Amino acid sequence: MSIEFCDMDFSSFYNAHIEAIRDAEFPGLGDQTYVDHAGTTLYARSQLEAYHNDLMRHVYGNPHSGSASSQLTTDTIEQIRYRVLQFFNTTSKEYTVIFTSGCTQALKLVAETFDFSGIETEKEDGGKILFKNRGDNYCFCDSDSKTADSTVKKDESCKNVGYFYYLCDNHTSAQGMRELIVKRAENVIPLNVSDVFKTCISHPVNPSVNCNNLFVYPAQSNYSGQKFPLEWIEQIQNSQLKCQQNTGGCWYVLLDAAAYASTSHLDLTHNKPDFVTVSFYKIFGHPTGLGALLVKNDSRHVLKKEYFGGGTVSVSSAQENFHIFRDDISERFEDGTLPFLDIIALRYGIMTVYKLSGGMEKISQHTFCIAQFFYKNLQQLHHSNGRLLAEIYTGSDFKERNRQGAIINFNLIRFNGDYIGFAEVDKMAQLHNIHLRTGCFCNIGACQKYLNISTEQLKSNFQEGHVCGDDKDLINGKPTGSVRISFGYMSTLTDAVKCLQFIIECFLQGSNPLPLIIQQAEDIVRKSLVEKTTIDTAKQLPNKLGYKDLIVGTTVVTETKPVADVVKQCGEKRLLTNIFIYPIKSCAAFEVKDWVIGNKGLLYDREWMIVSDSGVTISQKREPRLCLLKPFIDLQEQKLYLNFPDMPQFILSLEKSNKTYTGQICTNKVCGDKVETFDCGEEASDWVSLALGRSGCRLLRHKTEDSRKCKLKDTVSESKAGNEISLANESQFLLLSRESVKALVKKIQEDNDQIRGEKQESELLETTTLGEENLISRFRANLVIGGGFKFEEDNWSNINIGSNKMVSQGGCSRCQMICLDQTTASRSKEPLKTLASWRGRKVPFGIHVRMESLSETQNILTVGDTVTLI
């Protein structure tokens, strides 16, 4: 039955209770707006506390052992299997839960084991079905007997005949099944939604052939949020769809419910697919790395497993090719020791969802309300010339909850009709503390459909350098991906309003409907609170929402620095005015007058980095106070001095002898590259942890012999030089032009003067304090050039700085890091806001350069060196 939401329904279905508890249950959100729930939803404080209390109260042993603690684990896991089945409104009589690492492994498991041939081995006495692997040994299915005389009944014509259908609008993991299946099934056919009803296969087979066929489709598109009919399940199983005409054999349905189950109630009593795949972190936020394959018991015989791991067999021989799988299908398919502590955490995910939201049906109502609100307002946004701001990709009109989930997918369009690349939108979203997702979302079929990208165009884009997951968002003006916003059970209308405000402020030209949108949201919440009188904090809630204070500027204090004498000599003559070294990645700069160049850039530049207790690199994006940690290098004393406000100075030796550093060797990642480092010891760890107020931090140093290569291409040759780099993100040197910085300062001031009346006092103070030196420090360049013309560096290819020959490797694409004042650790919206609208979607500012070659004598850079263009 269609469910439509009128204004009265909207307020009654919206869960205003979440407004009252969100700060307490999700304290990590703070002033951040998280709208990537289709990627993963968030975990609650009470959920983790309950789980941790459980672990503190009990001892859980390996379930493959025989101790009391092992038995407790086994019993607990079985109880949780039951709870999972109950969550999907079914029982162990109809379905079995096979735990996997996620939805992807569940899909792969079916792809590896589904039997298309229809070959069956039956006992002569007509007993339970046996099944035969592709080897020589028979493996028993649900039989108490361990030996049997059997005859093989085989229809030779069935070999490589079965059909595999998959919907194009499917996750990549479902699409990838075909690579395993194509070796066993003769027919692998992708279908569009319209094909399911309209297209008849062109090469029918004998309908009397006893083969097995598999149809895979998602209950909900993770791209657009479109929900596909669950009625298809029974129709497919009964071969009632037109696309199944003349296929013959038995049809089985695999339903990918990962996206659907995150905000909708999957009822397996009314709809009974043969296989269901889910990922639990999308529903509960915690644990990650855990999913399940739900197998309909009547269909388990078509999964024919070959590999066996620990705990999956009743007997096996190491000397002979002989084994018999366990009778229970979950034990048979769960290779090795289960992640039992993660499975135990599921209990508290299920409990928390019901406690905080009232269950999946109410979550579906709540999230759809918010998504519908966002969709309707986004749909109505127009530039002053009448052009729509957003191109929305949906298979529904957001009127019926059983046809649409809580996902809105779109691209934004400029005043002149050009697309705004998703990478630009993402950068500006990060500046506004909005967490959304961009790209194709591992669903290339939907991406091709909605963006009208042919397979030929995909190949062409690949040749242009575009790969899945990169930020190459526009090719020849056409989008390669889009922007996705999705809501979860802890989402509020505030989140939707913040997203709309961000879009309007950054991308809408000549119109501002925001006050009306805010009023709509406030009216809905107010009405919901009146209807839900049990909420104690209802009277305080409207003020707590704080719609009028969504964007507040940050006061920035500009540090006054003496300008080097060499700057005064610059005019048309170009000179090196500043040299900055950043010994510790993402920490403060160390400025020098002259410095040695090593084989990876400036000597000691980005040679150290700080990681969290989990080993993840900490940058200023996550810890702004890193900019207050100021290193100083004394080459004569061979010492690195670390300074932090209100902390005693810490001293490290620059020597790399085994006596100096006894810490363990570590493997970390920097911009996707594996790097080898070694730990600088407990004292350094304690000092850094105390300074940053974060326990467990470690100071690591890049190993000299670790060779990390630059991936950037030279501007002229378009070839990769493959030169060595340190722990820097991309290149040996980052070069900045003072003339370009001056132009940016002027642009910010001009824009500020034009809209002075619309800005808050804090925002005006922010922009007036953005002087030349302040901006230079924010861009964190190694080399600053004075003289010449603004932005001429964009076109440089080869340059000489003094006697050092360098090669340009293109512009540096900027992110929200430049919005952090390096002297105060305070954030602002500038200069990224101005740069994004002024310099284009990649927000280039400054260029990457490398040494062409090192001379046999020492290479040195000195402030005042002449810069010559070659």
Image: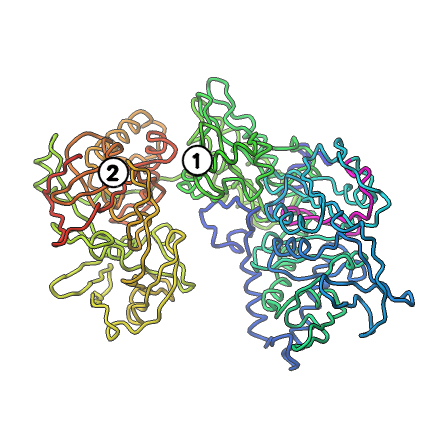
Residue at left offset 41%, top offset 52% = 672
Q: Residue furthest top?
A: 385
Residues in magenta?
A: 243-270
In magenta stretch: residue 251? yes
Looking at the rendered structure, which numbered label has been put on residue 230? Answer: none
Q: Which residue is mark 1?
A: 464
Towards the viewer: 554 or 461: 461
Residue at left offset 92%, top offset 68% = 125
Looking at the rendered structure, which numbered label has been put on residue 770? Answer: 2
Secondary structure of the residue carrying tag 1 is loop
Q: Position of residue 697 (x, y in %)?
A: 36, 64
Q: Residue furthest right?
A: 125
Q: CA distance from mark 2 to mark 1?
A: 38 Å
Q: Position of residue 617 (x, y in %)?
A: 37, 57
The quadrant of the picture occupied by the C terminus is top left
In magenta stretch: residue 518? no
The quadrant of the picture occupied by the N terminus is top right
Towards the viewer: 823 or 143: 143
**Position of 62 compared to 792: left or right?**
right
Question: How is the protein colored in the picture?
Answer: rainbow
Say if mark 2 contacts mark 1, CB within 8 Å.
Answer: no
Secondary structure of the residue carrying tag 2 is loop
Instruction: Say whether residue 367 is visible.
Output: yes
Instruction: Say whether residue 550 is visible.
Output: no
Q: Residue furthest bottom?
A: 67
Q: Residues within 10 Å of mark 1 (few under 14, many from 20)?
A: few
**Position of 206 compared to 605: left or right?**
right
Q: Quadrant of residue 409?
A: top right
Residue at left offset 55%, top offset 48% = 39
**Three-letter amino acid code at disc 2?**
Leu
Q: Earlier in the sequence, mark 2 or mark 1?
A: 1
Q: Position of residue 826 (x, y in %)?
A: 31, 47
